Image: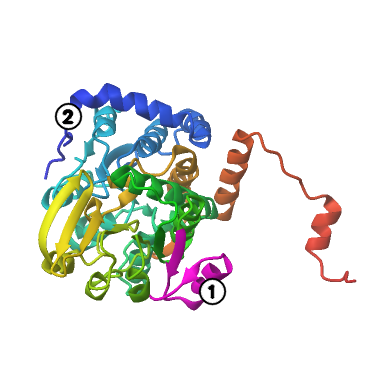
Amino acid sequence: MKTMDHDIKDISLADQGLGRIEWAFHEMPVLRILMERFAREKPLAGVRMSGCLHITTETANLARVLAAGGADLVLCASNPLSTQDDVAAALVRHCSIPVFAVKGEDNRRYYRHIDAALDHRPRITMDDGADLVSEMHKKRQELLDGMLGGTEETTTGVIRLRAMAREKALRFPIIAVNDALTKHLFDNRYGTGQSTLDGIIRATNILLAGKVFTVAGYGWCGRGIAMRANGHGAHVIVTEVDPVSALEAVMDGYRVMPMLEAAAVSDFIITATGDRNVIDQPHFEVMKDGCIIANAGHFNVEINIPALEQSARKKQRPRQYVDEYLLQSGRTVRLLAEGRLVNLAAAEGHPSAVMDMSFANQALCAEFLCSCKERLDNTVHPVPEEIDREIARMKLHAMQMDIDVLTEEQEKYLSSWQEGT
């Protein structure tokens, strides 16, 4: 199969997209530092890479860094609703990077685009949700030989890849970028927290203060959403299946209860679990009239949309990203962004400043895969600690923040066991 040049919505949007890409780059000082070094050293020279990522301004700047480092790069979308069409156009016209992504594409076109990215015969994959790696293992196994490895951006993707590794199905090494401290402690918490609220507010324009706001899942994404909703004056409820996470939510000041109880009192319910049917038929049956439901997890399976469709006697779209379902009981349930990532479908995704660190991890892990003298095992690997700490140092430096340095005496004390009280 021959790789298509590109498949985007409208090339005439390129100049608009380039302006927004440059605006985002101003907030990404770590990537700016890396671009200078990559352009000088070319650590990715000639390496074919395929990225299945959200096509946003931040991703565009990662792509520019990879290209500056010599990578031969092709991009496709990791979600049918997350593409920013002007950014895709700018990457094609101004950066000469083939892109296969159109906002609102159907599932058939989505997977055709993934196939086009695989036609590039990558040696390194860069995934956001593991669809690229999954499709390669299921349908394009002829591409597996000669792979250097891949990187994975999301919690959901890491879960899928670890399942593949447990079953001995994973045929090349993956670095779990999501698990880097400079990724999930900041991107997942502060990025998801702000951008999810941004998506909800843009989609609905409803005041959050005084509303009952339920967050399903208290991982780092759920923590961030709960924190930001609380800051808007909402009364936050958390639902969980893990007792430690539930206890932490209680200690953080939130009410914790089962979803069935929360559904009956909530004005908003947001899922961030990575699992399926977190909001299901029994919950629809007890929801408050007008309850707004949305998803902040990677895949659109956290809300049982087929069950909601079957329960409704009427469906209408009062606003661009709002589907309102009239249930048999006469109550209404409002679904945002078709159950897909609300922060990317109804807004612009994470702020550039937080994606700066996440995408610095991606770039440096790609360099690491190219520089490994020995092939890594076919499993999911952590980001090397030195990469994680170097990114934190660069970010602090860019923010003009200094920190202390251990003295020789302090280092000796921390590495010894003889001294006590």
Q: Amino acid at mark 2?
A: Asp
**Residue for point 43% across, 57% down:** 175
Residue 86 at what x, y percent from top left? 26, 30
Q: Quadrant of the C terminus?
A: bottom right
Asked if residue 245 is among those painted magenta in the image, a careful observer would answer yes
Residue 352 at what x, y percent from top left? 44, 38
Q: Is residue 226 above or below residue 407?
A: below
Label 2: few (<14), some (14–19) or many (≥20) C-alpha neighbours in 10 Å? few
Residue 157 at what x, y percent from top left? 35, 60
Q: Which one is in front, 276 or 359?
A: 276
How far apart in space, not on screen, are marks 2 and 1 (Cα)? 49 Å
Task: Give the color scheme: rainbow, by chain, secondary structure or one colour.
Answer: rainbow
Label for residue 341? none
Residue position marked by numbered label 1 in the rendering? 247
Label 1: few (<14), some (14–19) or many (≥20) C-alpha neighbours in 10 Å? some
Q: Which residues are magenta?
A: 235-258
Q: Amino acid at mark 1?
A: Leu
Q: Which one is in front, 382 or 292?
A: 292
- Residue pushed farthest right? 421
Q: Quadrant of the N terminus?
A: top left
In terms of secondary structure, where does tag 1 sit?
Answer: helix
Residue 286 at what x, y percent from top left? 27, 73
Q: Which one is in front, 79 or 294?
A: 294
Label for residue 10? 2
Asked if residue 368 lies left or right of residue 59, the reply is right
